[in-house]
Image (cartoon, grey):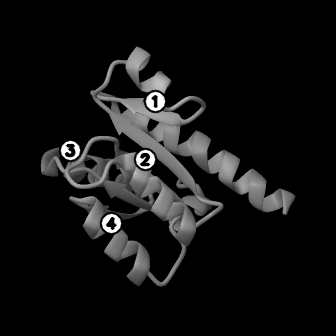
């Protein structure tokens, strides 16, 4: 049975690899999430500015042309300060943890189950903070 909270959850997925972007979108839509996609940080920024509702999670690649995922996440937090960020990277876990201590990171390649697990954990933290406010 679909978790009713998922129907109201919007995820912005940003990756310059079109195949991976589409695969992630399909997986998350099948899980019941509303998914917005962008193939670049610039396109993601346009979506952030024009989207009329909340975006609960930014799922972004770390390495993209023109703007990296960390800079994009900083911009995202100005629009949606309480929302979650999950980074995706092809870096080894040892390299990525040096760059992203304490951050939610998915290491490519990852399984659909791991993707959904990471999204669910991020949402649990997001909804807990909303309750605490």
Determine the CA span between mark 3 and mark 2. Answer: 19 Å
Residue at (23%, 59%) from the top-left corner? 40
> Do callouts 1 and 2 mark residues in contact (Cβ within 8 Å)?
yes
3 or 2: tag closer to the N-terminus: 3
Callout 3: helix, strand or loop? helix
2 or 4: tag closer to the N-terminus: 4
Q: Is residue 31 visible?
A: no
Identify whether 118 is placed above or below 32. above
- Residue 78's disc is none
Where does the image place residue 99, in percent across and percent down from the top left? Answer: 46, 29
Determine the CA span between mark 1 and mark 3. Answer: 23 Å
Callout 4: helix, strand or loop? helix
Q: Residues within 10 Å of mark 4 (few under 14, many from 20)?
A: many
Could you tell me which quadrant the C terminus lies in? bottom right
* Residue on which disc 1 sits: 99
- Residue 70's disc is 2
Where does the image place residue 73, in percent across and percent down from the top left? Answer: 46, 54
Instruction: Name the one closer to the observer, 100 or 118.
Output: 100
State how many labels appear.
4
Determine the CA span between mark 1 and mark 2. Answer: 10 Å
Where does the image place residue 31, in percent across and percent down from the top left? Answer: 43, 51
* Residue on which disc 3 sits: 20
Q: Residues within 10 Å of mark 1 (few under 14, many from 20)?
A: few
Identify whether 74 is placed above or below 27. below
> Do callouts 1 and 4 mark residues in contact (Cβ within 8 Å)?
no
Callout 2: helix, strand or loop? helix
Determine the CA span between mark 4 and mark 3. Answer: 16 Å
Determine the CA span between mark 1 and mark 4. Answer: 22 Å
């Amino acid at each position: 049975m679909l978790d009713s909270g998922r129907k109201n959850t919007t995820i912005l997925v940003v990756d310059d690899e079109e195949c991976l972007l589409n695969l992630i979108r399909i997986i998350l839509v099948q899980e019941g999430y509303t998914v917005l996609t962008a193939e670049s940080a610039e396109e993601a920024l346009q979506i952030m500015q024009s989207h009329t509702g909340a975006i609960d999670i930014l799922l972004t690649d770390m390495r993209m042309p023109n703007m990296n995922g960390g800079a994009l996440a900083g911009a995202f937090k100005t629009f949606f300060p309480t929302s979650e960020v999950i980074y995706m990277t092809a870096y080894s876990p040892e390299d990525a943890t040096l760059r992203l201590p304490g951050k939610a990171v998915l290491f490519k390649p990852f399984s659909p189950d791991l993707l959904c697990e990471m999204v669910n954990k991020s949402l649990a933290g997001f909804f807990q903070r909303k309750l605490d406010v």
